[in-house]
Amino acid sequence: MEIILLERIEKLGGIGDVVTVKNGFARNYLLPNNKALRANDANRKLFEANRAKIEADNAERRGDAEGRAKDIDGKQIVLIRQASNTGQLYGSVAVRDIVEALADDGVQGVTKAMVELERPIKSLGLVDVKVKLHPEVVVTVGVNVARSPDEAEMQSQGIDVIAAMFEEEQAAAAAVALEPDSEDEYDDATPPSEAAGDAPAADADDAEAAKADEA
């Protein structure tokens, strides 16, 4: 289907461009969201008659978005979730969670449609998520998914929490392996020095017994 774009669409074009897209994409997304018009003669004339206003409105919205971007770009939000020792979440982090966390952090006006998350987050760690405040203004928000505030702080410092935990477990296992099985090992074992000291005494006793037998 041929359409006339009413705003910039990534990988398609800018305002006023006539492009061809799949019918489903046009009918299900572009047309109902007022992002495009069908490219027929009537709509071409309608667009040209309103082009100046459309471009002026777009410039105003872009300016507002650029002003907001300064306070949002690079912001990091923390989401505390339960997870296994391998870092897999018991559940996932979705777009709604990110929008709510931003709102709790004082960022208003971000909708689910603005957040670009290809798939839900299902593991601990830091994830950069794009937020499209305007078709021409995109910012990046850091999503820090951790099991506790302390782990979130470690991750923000660049520490791989799961790797660090694995190393600690390995060190603990190695320490346990080097420990004696029980304290009885110390009690039952005869020190080498004592064993060496007993040997001459035993030899002397044997010699005395031999002399007595000869007499």
Image (spheres, helix red, strand yellow):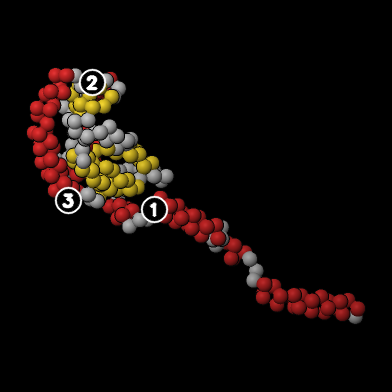
Q: Nearer the viewer, residue 19 or 109?
A: 19
Type of residue at label 1?
Asp
First in residue order: circle 3 vs circle 1: 3
Drawn side of residue 206 relative to residue 188, left or right: right
The residue wearing badge 1 is: 160
Q: Residue at x 31, y 54 (%)?
A: 156
Q: Residues within 10 Å of mark 1 (few under 14, many from 20)?
A: some
Q: Position of residue 42 (x, y in %)?
A: 14, 19
Q: Nearer the viewer, mark 2 or mark 3?
A: 2
Residue 2 location (% of width, % of height): 25, 22
Which quadrant: the N terminus? top left
Q: Is residue 175 left or right of residue 52?
A: right
Decide: few, some or many residues near mark 3? Use Cα within 10 Å; few <14, some 14-19, many ≥20: few
N-terminal-most mark, 1 or 2: 2
Q: Amino acid at mark 2?
A: Arg
> SS of the residue at dot 3?
helix
Label 1 near label 3: C-beta < 8 Å?
no
Element class at badge 1 = loop
Q: Quadrant of residue 34?
A: top left
Q: Could you tell me which residue is drawn at 26 percent across and 46 percent down?
A: 140
Where residue 4 appears, x then y in whole percent? 20, 26
Q: Of the residues shown, which amino acid type is indicated by label 3?
A: Asp
How far separated are the C-alphas under marks 3 and 1?
Answer: 28 Å
Residue 124, position as x, y percentages in the image = 35, 45
Q: Quadrant of residue 139?
A: top left
Query: Which residue corresponds to mark 3?
Result: 71
Q: Nearer the viewer, residue 6 or 81?
A: 6
Read off the residue under disc 2: 27
